[in-house]
């Protein structure tokens, strides 16, 4: 009996040691939004180890409570899904490595931070360009709008690719939201389609509605690579697949735990899902290629 007690005691010590050595990983969701839940599902199916999952449920109080708790016993790594979760990590988890996704404002939130990896809230710009041409094969003049400060755009590369595709690309890299009305007005008579990259300051929730109204008034479709504008007036979009966003977040989290490079300052892109907005297309008297309609998500 005494021997059995010793073995049990030793087992408890060993189990405790193993538990202490296990990575302390936390996945934090901003809310119960179905898209964020799909991201979490992609992370669950791909991340190889154990982790704790927390949902802030859109509550500022829960943000503070969770932040204070995690600050007291900091995790080894936090993966945040959505802007509210990203803000919690910024306020409370200094020096903790962060992987963020589905967070359009996070580029500003984490400006200057280290140990931060971004799974972009939009699809790869090169993939967007190819999708744009496929959706609008007869439109050869493209006006690209983005904010200089936060957009990760290789203008030289994308201009070269556009020329090879037979497109004329007019790049509008903006320093502030004040520049948008004038530049947009100048371009509406010069292009056949408006291509927009969302960012935290210039082309954000306060200005994208203006872009859509002005573009539709000029008879121009808007194309983008994110879900926000894609659901609020763009004729076509290529937002990231939410499950693949979660998969990419799991991959980057594993790299950090394995002490690999964290790619600070660069974005990781998930594959895009083509979305076609027939409601907007009808207003603009547009039709989409039939083969794309069979594969795309359709908004009626």
Image: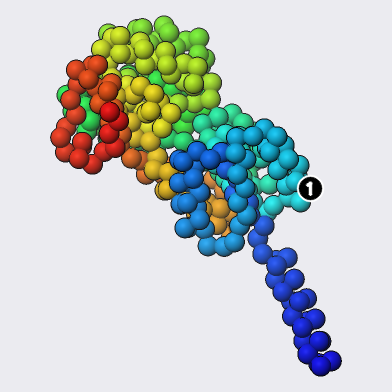
Q: Nearer the viewer, residue 171 or 125?
A: 125
Whether residue 265 is visible, yes or no, is no
Q: Quadrant of residue 223?
A: top left
Q: What is the number of callouts on the image?
A: 1
Expressed as whole percent of the image width and height from the top left, the position of residue 208 reads 43, 18
**Does residue 286 appear in the picture of this structure?**
yes
Name the residue at 74% across, 80% down: 11
What is the x, y in percent for residue 167? 23, 25
Q: Is residue 142 left or right of residue 47?
A: left
- Pick the residue in front: 253 or 155: 253
Name the foreground residue: 112 vs 90.
90
Quadrant showing the C terminus: top left
Q: Position of residue 170 (x, y in %)?
A: 32, 19
Which residue is disc 1 drawn over?
72
Q: Is 1 left or right of 177, judged from the image as shown? A: right
Q: Position of residue 234 (x, y in %)?
A: 34, 24
**Residue at x 29%, y 37% (from the top left corner):** 297
Please tell me which residue is depicted at 33% across the width and 40% down the height of the picture.
273
Q: Quadrant of the N terminus?
A: bottom right
Q: Residue 299: which quarter of the image?
A: top left
Task: Left or right? Give the position of 80 relative to 13.
Answer: left
Q: Are there few (<14), some (14-19), or many (20+) residues within 10 Å of tag 1?
A: few
Tell me the SS state at disc 1.
Answer: helix
Which quadrant of the view contains residue 94? top right
Q: Is residue 21 left or right of residue 259?
A: right
């Amino acid at each position: 009996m005494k021997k059995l007690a010793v073995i049990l005691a030793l087992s408890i010590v060993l189990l405790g040691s193993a538990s202490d050595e296990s990575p302390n990983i936390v996945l934090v969701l901003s809310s119960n939004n179905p898209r964020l839940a799909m991201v979490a599902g992609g992370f669950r199916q791909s991340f190889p180890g154990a982790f704790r999952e927390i949902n802030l449920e859109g509550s500022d109080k829960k943000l503070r409570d969770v932040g204070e708790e995690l600050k007291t016993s900091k995790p080894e790594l936090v993966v945040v899904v959505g802007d509210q979760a990203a803000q919690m990590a910024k306020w409370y988890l200094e020096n903790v490595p962060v992987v963020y996704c589905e967070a359009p404002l996070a580029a500003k939130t984490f400006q200057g931070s280290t140990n931060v990896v971004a799974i972009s809230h939009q699809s790869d710009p090169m993939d967007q360009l190819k999708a744009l041409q496929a959706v609008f094969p007869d439109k050869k003049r493209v006006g690209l709008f983005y904010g200089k400060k936060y957009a990760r755009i290789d203008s030289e590369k994308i201009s070269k690719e556009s020329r090879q595709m037979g497109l004329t690309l007019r790049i509008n890299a903006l320093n502030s939201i004040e520049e948008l009305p004038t530049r947009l007005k100048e371009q509406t008579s010069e292009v056949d389609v408006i291509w927009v990259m969302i960012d935290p300051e210039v082309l954000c929730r306060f200005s994208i509605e203006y872009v859509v109204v002005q573009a539709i008034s000029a008879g121009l479709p808007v194309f983008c690579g994110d879900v926000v504008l894609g659901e609020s007036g763009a004729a076509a979009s290529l937002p990231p697949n939410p499950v693949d966003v979660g998969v990419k977040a799991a991959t980057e989290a594993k790299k950090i735990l394995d002490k690999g490079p964290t790619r600070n300052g660069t974005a990781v892109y998930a594959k895009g899902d083509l979305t076609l907005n027939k409601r907007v297309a009808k207003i603009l008297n547009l039709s989409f290629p039939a083969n794309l309609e069979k594969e795309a998500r359709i908004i009626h």
